[in-house]
Image: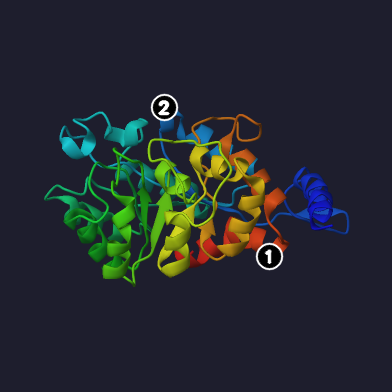
Amino acid sequence: MDQLLNISRRRVLAGVSALPVGRVLGGESAPEPVIDIHQHTNYKFRSDEQLAEHQRKMGVTTTILLPSGRALERASTHDGRSNGLAANVLPNEASQAMAEKYGSAFRFGANEVPDIPEARKTLEKFLKAGAVVIGEQKFNVPCDSKYIWQLAEIAREYDVPVLMHFQDGSYNTGIERFHKTLEKFPDVKFIGHAQTWWGNIDKHHCPSAMYPRTPVVAGGISDRLLKDYPNMYADLSAGSGRNSMLRDEEHAQWFLERHQDKIMFGSDCPDSDGQSKGCIGFTTLAIVRRLAMSKAIERKILYGNAKTVFRL
């Protein structure tokens, strides 16, 4: 019986997800706010105008722009191969400029290569200017290193979260030790993102699998961090976030409900479309609306949690 009810419910949700974003009141659609916590300027050379239109088409009302650090050739940037977040993303000034140009629809973050002497000075400059997050941290350093701990100290001083790209062997390595950072900085909010973060919803995750397709065995590292640490949050963006739901939809429904106060919507897609199956953000929105077990859960993930975490 439960299985039949789930099937029927999915059909209903699928129909609802096809409707325009918003609540229908008296035959008119009242837009519901959506916060996208993960976008970039110049992402694979997309223009600011194309990005703004992309977000509008998705129905996003507030977008957080995550800049790159400065371009350097050192081990933490893979000798320069990871400059621009490995996607041609521009540094802090570009995100700040776009946010100032487009007003309240865009907010910006602060970022820097974490293992250079200038890191603190750079981050503080943009945090004082109004940055709402440190990140996207996407550098080849251990996630429990003194470099990440310095970022956490700065984040604590300015009361902003830190968004981290976990990718085995490449970025913020050693996720199995990240609990040390969470314990050392209980009053700093950390947001997990990317392949190794979302792969580790599975208790039996293979570290080399970036986009696993197998059913999920509950109880992986990411699940435990979200459950056990009040300062751990999750970013649903990119193909890794979308894949985490599509690989096992039954588990995804459970996971979204279990961590409904910790998960936030992000797009992190470089296209200029914003309204087709080729757009990761657009399809991730549809998946959340289809799989969320209640309207209240959907609204937390698409708006409420980010509003609180980023103090918007």
The local crowd at label 1, few if under 14, some if 14 to 19, many if 20 or more residues have their Cα within 10 Å, is: few
Q: Position of residue 8 (x, y in %)?
A: 84, 50
Determine whether 283 is above or below 120 in the image.
Answer: above
Amino acid on which disc 1 is placed? Ala
The label number, if any, that marks residue 45 in the structure image: 2
Q: Which mark is residue 137?
A: none
Q: Earlier in the sequence, mark 1 or mark 2?
A: 2
In the image, what residue occupies the spot 52% across and 32% down? 50
Q: Are marks 1 and 2 in contact (CB under 8 Å)?
A: no
In the image, residue 268 lies at what x, y percent? 48, 40
Name the residue: 49% across, 40% down. Answer: 240
Q: Position of residue 23 (x, y in %)?
A: 77, 57
**Disc count in the image?**
2
Residue 93 visible somewhere in the drawing: yes
* Structural crowding at the residue carrying mark 2, measured as other residues with C-alpha within 10 Å and reported as few (<14), some (14–19) or many (≥20): few
Residue farthest bottom in this picture: 187
- Looking at the rendered image, the quarter that the N terminus falls into is bottom right
* Mark in front: 1 vs 2: 1
* Residue at mark 1 to residue at mark 2: CA–CA distance: 37 Å
Q: Nearer the viewer, residue 243 or 84?
A: 243
x and y percentages locating residue 223 in the rendered image: 48, 58
Residue 311 placement, left or right of 9: left
Task: Tell me if residue 310 can be seen.
Answer: no
At horizontal 36% and vertical 63% (from top left) the residue drawn is: 160
Q: Amino acid at mark 2?
A: Phe
